[in-house]
């Protein structure tokens, strides 16, 4: 047969079928890689902005840079470094005796014994000194301080509050002490909460020994304190901490101390509200110079809808070695990056763009994530479909998930694929982690998940791989399950296999909250109007069916104030949602009252 005739027949011959690209495979998750990454990550603390401790940043950067589209962001922020601290007690002989504020070093734990020590400190507390009698202030609620004032009267003025951790965010405890007239605050973890009353303590069990100390931020805000509502870029205008009011910053010095020292301060008095102890003096010294933080981001560009983004994030910084908080989330994020890179190199591409983010300075007040959202506010509001937060994802066998309504179905589908149980209606995310700026500044649907168990090393120098490998997850099985679940979420969200649609769920929740407001609000007429608007909007959304004018995943954006003209900056900060906002570790509905929510409901109906 002539060659020309043979070529003419070629279009008629069946072409070989090409196998579709292999999507990300959860079976590629490696417990060995997770273990090795956690051990390497926790070789030293990862205190945000500490230039000497950069190995953790380099480890994550290398994982992202080698195989993905790497895009870091740098911010200059106010994280005053504690350079000195002290606590002295006046003994019976009238002499001042200094207390040892260091945690015990567990020689059985090679990571702790070899690690540089982060001083016992509260992020963004006030520098200075205080001297006064110690009064036990219970959990540090407003009611506790009111009861203390009723019992001790003017003795509270200028006293030092001894406050038990738990019940509410530590920053609110210090702020409540300041409002009640106290000159300083000392916070301790009680053995009934995470110590000997719960079981064997370290090094023999996972609970906190009496000498353990819980560090943490006491900033009552999110993001960089000197750029409230706009991004802390190098040239950004800033508040002057010496001259200007800094919203959310407490005005009295505070320190975290151990239960053992708390007992010493009270002597024979019980560790209970109202107990009076010795006279003490305390001081906190700081270096207020701005520091650099580094958000590390990598992208897998979408093949069909590259302008729709799904963001996975975990914070990298810690108050010590940080194995559980948040070494677990960081190494799972790194493992997700590896599994996605394997699939990309084999020819797979998600329909949507996947973004992996290693946030810095979360522990100081969600600083890295907030600054990134503030800098990219227009893009985030326009493009981000969902945010998946990975903060403490592997500390035990109990699987749990929290999610805004648009991600309820996705959370259940990923759980079903992994043989896990997820509730029909997961609880909503509260406060205290990196989902907050996405939800509150950008109206993004968000979720978090993890495999959890009890332990007492939170925010201490004892939060090391020793705790993980001896008590919480010896085989890294829960780490692997968390990574597999993250891979499932990336596939489902990246390929839009389960719609991100919270219309019905959000309206059910708004109706419930509005009905409660009718029963409790002093302005009943406004509350009734809110409920009527919510009912009308729910009916309109149901009538719109499956073809809303705007994507269903943008529903929470209706409750955001518009972007400031010219971008966020002094006098024009990026506004927060009027629907639901964090309050410490929790959250509350309609924080600005009913009026802006009513406006948002009407805007939703007009947009259908």
Image (cartoon, grey):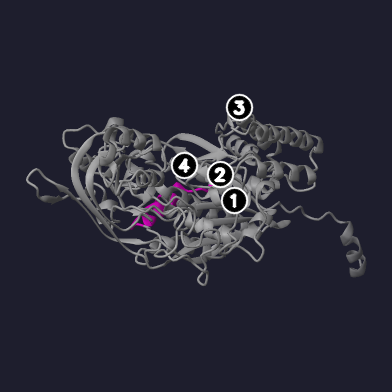
Q: Earlier in the sequence, mark 4 or mark 3?
A: 3
- Residue ID for mark 3: 519
Q: Secondary structure at mark 4?
A: loop
- Residue ID for mark 1: 576
With 22 as the anchor, is 212 left or right in this view? left
Q: Are marks 1 and 2 in contact (CB under 8 Å)?
A: yes
Circle 2 residues within 10 Å: few <14, some 14–19, many ≥20: many
Rounded to the nearest angstrom, the CA distance separating label 1 from label 3 is 26 Å
Q: Are marks 2 and 3 in contact (CB under 8 Å)?
A: no
Could you say where residue 333 lies in the image, as x and y percent from the top left? 50, 52
Which of the two discs, 4 and 3, sits closer to the camera?
3
In this orientation, does residue 355 appear?
A: yes
Q: Quadrant of residue 538?
A: top right
Which of the two discs, 1 and 4, sits closer to the camera?
1
Q: Earlier in the sequence, mark 1 or mark 2?
A: 1
Which of the two discs, 2 and 3, sits closer to the camera?
3
Rounded to the nearest angstrom, the CA distance separating label 4 from label 2 is 10 Å
- Residue ID for mark 2: 581
Span of residues in magenta: 28-45
Circle 3 residues within 10 Å: few <14, some 14–19, many ≥20: few
- Residue ID for mark 4: 585
Rounded to the nearest angstrom, the CA distance separating label 4 from label 3 is 25 Å
Magenta stretch holds residue 383: no
Task: Residue at 89% x, 69% y: name it.
Answer: 3
**Direction bottom: furthest residue:** 235
Position of the C terminus, as image quadrant, is: top right
Q: Are marks 4 and 3 in contact (CB under 8 Å)?
A: no
Which of the two discs, 4 and 2, sits closer to the camera?
2
């Amino acid at each position: 047969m002539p060659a020309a005739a043979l070529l003419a027949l070629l279009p008629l011959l069946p072409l070989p079928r090409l196998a579709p690209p292999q999507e990300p495979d959860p079976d590629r998750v490696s417990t060995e890689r997770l273990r090795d990454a956690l051990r390497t990550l926790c070789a030293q603390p990862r205190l945000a902005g500490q230039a000497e401790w950069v190995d953790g940043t380099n480890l994550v950067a290398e994982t992202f840079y080698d195989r993905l589209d790497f895009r870091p962001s740098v911010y200059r922020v106010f994280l005053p470094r504690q350079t000195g601290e002290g606590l002295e007690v006046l003994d019976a002989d009238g002499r001042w005796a200094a207390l040892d504020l260091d945690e015990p070093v567990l020689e059985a734990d090679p990571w702790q014994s070899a690690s540089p020590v982060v001083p016992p400190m509260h992020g963004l507390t006030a520098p200075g000194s205080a001297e006064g009698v110690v009064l036990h202030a219970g959990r540090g609620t407003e009611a506790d301080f009111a009861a203390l004032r009723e019992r001790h009267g003017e003795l509270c003025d200028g006293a030092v509050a001894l406050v038990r951790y738990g019940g509410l965010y530590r920053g609110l405890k210090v702020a409540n002490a300041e409002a009640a007239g106290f000159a300083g605050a000392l916070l301790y973890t009680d053995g009934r909460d995470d110590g000997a009353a719960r079981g064997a303590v370290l090094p023999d069990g996972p609970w906190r020994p009496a000498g353990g100390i819980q560090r943490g931020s006491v900033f009552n805000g999110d993001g960089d304190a000197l750029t409230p509502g706009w991004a802390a870029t190098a040239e950004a205008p800033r508040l002057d901490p010496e001259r200007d009011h800094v919203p959310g910053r407490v005005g009295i010095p505070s320190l975290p101390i151990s239960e053992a020292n708390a007992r010493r301060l009270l002597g024979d008095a019980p560790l209970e509200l109202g107990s009076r102890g010795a006279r003490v003096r305390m001081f906190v010294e700081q270096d207020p110079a701005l520091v650099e933080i580094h958000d590390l981001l990598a992208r897998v560009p979408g093949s069909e809808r590259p302008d729709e983004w799904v963001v996975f994030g975990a914070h990298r910084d810690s108050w010590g070695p940080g194995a559980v908080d948040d070494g677990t989330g960081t190494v799972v994020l790194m493992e997700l990056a590896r599994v996605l890179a394997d699939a990309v190199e084999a020819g797979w591409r998600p329909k949507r763009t996947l973004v992996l983010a290693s946030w810095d300075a979360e522990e100081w007040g969600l600083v890295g994530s907030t600054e990134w959202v503030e800098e990219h506010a227009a893009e985030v509001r326009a493009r981000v479909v969902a945010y998946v937060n990975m903060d403490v994802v592997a500390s035990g066998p109990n699987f749990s998930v929290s999610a805004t309504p648009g991600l309820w179905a996705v959370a259940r589908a990923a759980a079903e694929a992994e043989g896990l149980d997820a509730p029909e209606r997961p609880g909503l995310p509260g406060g205290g982690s990196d989902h907050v700026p996405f939800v509150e500044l950008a109206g993004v649907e968000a979720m978090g998940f993890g495999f959890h168990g009890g332990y007492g090393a939170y925010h201490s120098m004892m939060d090391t791989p020793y705790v993980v490998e001896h008590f919480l997850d010896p085989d890294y099985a829960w780490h692997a399950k968390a990574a597999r679940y993250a891979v499932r979420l990336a596939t489902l969200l990246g390929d839009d296999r389960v719609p991100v649609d919270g219309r019905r769920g959000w309206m059910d929740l708004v109706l419930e909250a509005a009905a409660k407001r009718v029963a409790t609000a002093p302005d009943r007429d406004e509350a009734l109007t809110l409920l009527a608007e919510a009912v009308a909007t729910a009916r309109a959304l149901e009538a719109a069916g499956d073809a809303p004018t705007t994507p269903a995943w943008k529903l929470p954006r209706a409750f955001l104030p518009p972007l400031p003209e010219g971008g966020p900056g002094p006098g024009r900060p990026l506004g927060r949602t009027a629907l639901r906002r964090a309050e410490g570790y929790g959250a509350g509905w309609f924080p600005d009252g009913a009026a802006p929510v009513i406006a948002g409901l009407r805007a939703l109906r007009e947009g259908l």
